[in-house]
Amino acid sequence: MLRLIVAAALVFCSTVFAQAANWPQGNVTFIVPLGPGSGVDVTSRLLADKLSAKWGKPVVIENRPGGDAMVAINAFLSATDGQTLLMAPTSTFTAHPLLHASLPYQPADLVPIARVTNTLIAIGVPASLGVNSLAEFVKLAKEKPGALNYAGTTGALDFVVSGFLKDAGIDVPKVPYKDGVQALNDLAEGRIQIYSAAYAIVRPQVQAGKVKVLALTNKDRTDLLPDIPTAKEAGFASLTLDGLVGLFGQKDMPADVRERIAADVVEAARDPDFVKRVTETGQVVNPGKAAEFAAEIDEQRSRVAEAAKAAGMTK
């Protein structure tokens, strides 16, 4: 009997090893919920090049923007080849339960495989506003209640900004935008007085002298922007949200395959050329495996729910 148990265990182990060792069997697809040219898209393509060389199979990027990331998530979950992954910022979906009465998927359907980067998220104001810190912005808003406006865009960041305004006790009405580019243009021209978005998006207007970045929402200050504090350092911890970006697999993907992918992603992301090129897109390369990534996603979900409750923006 013991021999049979040992033999069965050996067969199981060899099968599991073979699954990981033989993956992938064909082309791998990364579905991205953002359009070509976005920071996550650029990162996906650089990572795909590294992994394609390692795996000996093409890694194809499929951009599926729109629909509050539902288009990409549905395409990812509908794939049946076992070789389709989702490459996404977690902020595209952590607010979904607060935004939609019903979802076509369950949060558990998106299984974290590996963290890849942290997008730098900037809090910007028009340079013409004449404020140089979050504290100065709050002071001005208290002096002029209702006179300043913020650009609101659907998603986790919108909840966090709204929570910050409520927490700071200032009356700054929301102007809703579907197009982040238009929001940024209006910020640069002074039609909107505060807006938060990926630093890579804001940077051209900063360089043009039209936008001033007061802080980053990220938990940690970055050497890439040493003179810009985090919101927490500036005294407003409620404005904290990390720009987590990583890879996700489906629930039925074998655990050993996910671990193999994670190990390969972490190795690829530490390549100096990859780090240099991704850093140029306004992201911090910060690879991590599944458990660490999952814990941070849970933390972000709690942070967004807390901010939404504080702002009275419950579903």
Image (cartoon, helix red, strand yellow):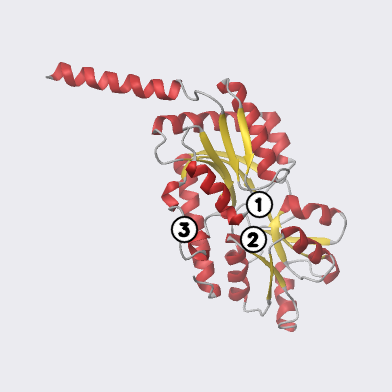
Please name the amino acid that badge 2 sits on: Glu
Instruction: Residue under label 3, please give it.
Output: 103
Task: Using the image as rendered, state which of residue 187 and residue 207 is in the foreground.
Answer: 187
- Badge 1 density bin: few <14, some 14–19, many ≥20, Cα 10 Å: some
Q: Do the residues bearing badges 3 and 2 touch, measured as CB atoms within 8 Å? A: no
Residue 29 in sight in this render: yes
Which residue does the image show at 76% across and 58% down from the upper left? 181
- Which secondary structure, mark 3? loop
Indicate the position of residue 250 as horizontal and vertical percent values: 45, 40
Say whether disc 1 or disc 2 marks the residue closer to the N-terminus: 1
Q: Write down the quadrant of residue 232 in the picture.
A: bottom right
Q: Is residue 84 left or right of residue 193?
A: left
- Which secondary structure, mark 1? loop
Q: Is residue 82 left or right of residue 233?
A: left
Q: Between label 3 and label 2, give the one nearer the viewer.
A: 3
- Which secondary structure, mark 2? loop
Which residue does the image show at 72% across and 35% down from the upper left? 276
Q: Write down the quadrant of residue 123 in the picture.
A: bottom right
The quarter in which the N terminus is drawn is top left
Above or below, 144 against 13 in this view is: below
Q: Is residue 96 left or right of residue 16?
A: right
Q: Between label 1 and label 3, give the one nearer the viewer.
A: 3
Which residue does the image show at 45% across and 33% down from the upper left? 258
Indicate the position of residue 30 as horizontal and vertical percent values: 58, 37
Instruction: Residue under label 2, please give it.
Output: 233
Above or below, 180 against 285 in this view is: below
Say whether disc 3 or disc 2 marks the residue closer to the N-terminus: 3
Please name the amino acid that badge 3 sits on: Leu
